[in-house]
Image (spheres, helix red, strand yellow):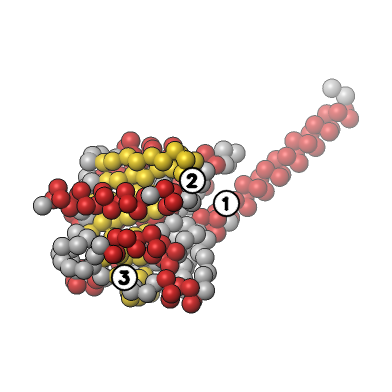
């Protein structure tokens, strides 16, 4: 190899390494803004959709004030759905999904995270876990409706919060629903960004549900999308395989991560909860 060609190859390698290192650094630096993207729907839209829901403000372990939205159950026998939404979602957008269940007398608790919907703080994995704990011991669940069956429901990012909460308090819940869940953010990053080195070391908020699901022995419903390009169908399937029974897997081959709601999942959730309640009688 002559000196001119050798220099060109060397310059190319150096340039590639500079660009590659810069890209990885930017992804590392901005990983939380990529993971948490709070939407900002108009206030009048929120108020219109959340009619029938009352705001519930709680204080977290680390001193933040966060507010979710609660619609009480019709009586002491009806279940309450404790719902944790996904990354770029909002309680107001989820209320229509639960309209059929609330019409059947279910209580619906649409919690909201720190840094979302004008709540204080900045979203982090440990922060969202603290938010979840605060809602669990709030008056609607710990006092007013403590006798009602409680169903924990996590969608996408919220599945990591739901699994964490249920693994800490398995006795508090009657069942769990996980919609387009993942086993670990580390595996999601590995699948989507295979060029990122050592993701287990670089990912700050890992939501390692695969290490916790074994503690959750209540009935579980897994709703997976065959065309999931956000977290990947395989990450949810791995979590299902790791989960102890009783468990039910429902796969929708034509559904995507963000349109799975259009594939009748609300009815599937309702049927599952009704079956769990019958079995507990």
The residue mark sitting in front, 1 or 3, is: 3
Give the quarter of the image for residue 235: top left
Q: Earlier in the sequence, mark 1 or mark 3?
A: 1
Could you give the CA–CA distance between mark 3 and mark 2, rounded to whole angstroms?
28 Å
- The residue that disc 1 covers is 28
Closer to us: 84 or 6: 84
Q: Residue at x 84, y 22 (%)?
A: 1
Closer to us: 192 or 258: 258
Percent position (x, y) of residue 267? 32, 51
Percent position (x, y) of residue 50? 39, 72
Q: Earlier in the sequence, mark 1 or mark 2?
A: 1
Closer to us: 88 or 212: 88
User: Label 2 neighbourhood size at 10 Å, few (<14), some (14-19), many (20+)?
Assistant: many
What element does badge 2 sit on?
strand
In the displayed structure image, the side of residue 27 where residue 247 appears, left or right: left
Give the quarter of the image for residue 145: bottom left
Give the quarter of the image for residue 172: bottom left
In the displayed structure image, the side of residue 77 where residue 226 appears, left or right: right
Percent position (x, y) of residue 92? 43, 67
What element does badge 3 sit on?
strand
Q: Residue furthest left?
A: 281
- The residue that disc 3 covers is 70
Percent position (x, y) of residue 266? 35, 53
Could you give the CA–CA distance between mark 1 and mark 2, rounded to whole angstroms?
27 Å
- The residue that disc 2 covers is 256
Q: Earlier in the sequence, mark 3 or mark 2?
A: 3
In the displayed structure image, the side of residue 88 where residue 250 appears, left or right: left
Rendered image: mark on residue 190: none
Q: Residue at x 21, y 68 (%)?
A: 74
Could you give the CA–CA distance between mark 1 and mark 3, rounded to whole angstroms?
36 Å
User: Label 1 neighbourhood size at 10 Å, few (<14), some (14-19), many (20+)?
Assistant: some
């Amino acid at each position: 190899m002559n000196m001119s060609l050798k220099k060109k190859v060397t310059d190319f390698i150096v340039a590639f390494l500079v660009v590659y290192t810069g890209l990885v650094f930017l992804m590392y630096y901005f990983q939380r803004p990529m993971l948490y993207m709070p939407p900002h729907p108009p206030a009048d839209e929120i108020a219109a959709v959340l009619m029938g829901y009352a705001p519930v403000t709680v204080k977290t372990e680390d001193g933040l004030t966060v507010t979710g939205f609660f619609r009480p159950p019709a009586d002491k026998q009806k279940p309450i759905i404790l719902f944790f939404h996904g990354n770029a979602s909002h309680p107001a957008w989820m209320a229509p999904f639960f309209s059929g269940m609330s019409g059947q007398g279910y209580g619906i608790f649409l919690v909201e995270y720190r840094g979302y919907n004008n709540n204080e703080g900045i979203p982090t994995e440990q922060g969202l876990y603290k938010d979840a704990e605060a809602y669990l011991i709030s008056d609607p669940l710990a006092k007013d409706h403590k006798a009602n069956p409680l169903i924990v429901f996590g969608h996408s990012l919220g599945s990591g919060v739901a699994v964490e909460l249920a693994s800490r308090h398995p006795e508090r819940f009657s069942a769990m629903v996980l919609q387009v869940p993942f086993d670990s953010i580390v595996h999601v990053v590995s699948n989507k960004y295979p060029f990122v080195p050592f993701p287990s070391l670089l990912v700050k908020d890992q939501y390692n549900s695969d290490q916790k699901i074994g503690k959750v022995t209540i009935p579980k419903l897994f709703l997976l999308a065959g065309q999931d390009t956000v977290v990947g169908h395989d990450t949810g399937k791995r979590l299902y395989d790791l989960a102890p029974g009783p468990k039910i897997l429902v796969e929708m081959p034509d559904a995507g991560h963000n349109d799975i709601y259009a594939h009748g999942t609300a009815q599937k959730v309702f049927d599952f909860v009704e079956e769990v309640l019958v079995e507990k009688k």
